[in-house]
DNA sequence: ACATAGTGTAATATATACTTGACATTACAT
DNA sequence: ATGTAATGTCAAGTATATATTACACTATGT
């Protein structure tokens, strides 16, 4: 899995720390970090929560332009 | 969790059965059924795969207009 | 009446999302 | 030099997404 730099950027745009976003989304800081690092594959519900916190859409933060992905 | 009727509709629009979508997405039929029934909360990666199969965006199939959600 | 396709559902098993607690590093204050 | 805030990472545990097998129900076709 590849890093989610769009998320990192959106967070920066709001001047929020990983912890602040984690608290606002109701998850642990490690979870946000792991998502940004591409270490795992969040659930859609968590993605939606993050989108609402950051004022972005799913497509803006989580759409991936294919790449092989070796699913 | 509430049912995903948008997914069911998009599948119908393509005249695909749950099994056909499951095969195309590389998951089991029960997984597709459970998502449509709102029994669970798919990962973003699976959502992306489903979107590509059905030719829809994440926002079209998985955006939810808040509702409490009791996360 | 029988077969078959599509769907909903249940039980058990496995992979993995997510938690908690902890430690290291960098950078920026004082 | 010391403190602290932000980030990255690790290890062990819990919750849940997903697989597999199986069964029931409704249509529709023969």
Image (cartoon, coloured by chain):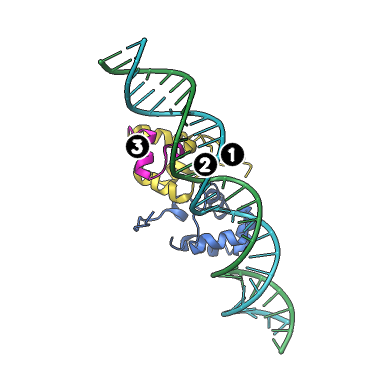
Chain colours: A blue, B yellow, C cyan, D green
Q: How packed is label 2: few (under 14 Cα within 10 Å), some, or many (20 or more)?
A: few
Classify mark 1: residues with Cα within 10 Å, few (<14), some (14-19) or many (20+): few
Instruction: Say what secondary structure mark 2 lies in.
Output: loop
Q: Give the label, 2 or 3, closer to the camera.
A: 3
Q: Nearer the viewer, residue C30 or A32?
A: A32
Residue C1 falls left or right of residue A54: left
- On the same chain, marks 1 and 2? The answer is yes
Residue B18, image x, y percentages: 39, 34
How many callouts does the rendering have? Answer: 3
Q: Are marks 1 and 2 in contact (CB under 8 Å)?
A: yes
Q: Position of residue B57 (x, y in %)?
A: 40, 46
Please state the horizontal and vertical placement of residue C17, each as a whole percent of the image. Answer: 54, 53
Name the residue located 46 percent from the left edge and 33 percent from the top edge. Answer: B5
Please give the label number shown on residue B64. 2
The subunit letter for the residue under badge 1 reads B
Residue A28 x/y as whole percent: 63, 58
Which residue is at 44% across, 46% downward? B47
| Boundaries of the magenta span | B15-32
């Amino acid at each position: 899995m590849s890093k989610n730099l769009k998320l990192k950027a959106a967070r920066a745009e709001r001047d929020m720390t990983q912890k602040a976003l984690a608290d606002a989304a109701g998850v642990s800081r490690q979870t946000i970090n792991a998502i940004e690092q591409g270490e795992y594959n969040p659930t859609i519900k968590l993605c939606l929560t993050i989108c609402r916190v950051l004022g972005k859409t799913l497509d803006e933060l989580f759409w991936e332009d294919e790449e092989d992905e070796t699913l």
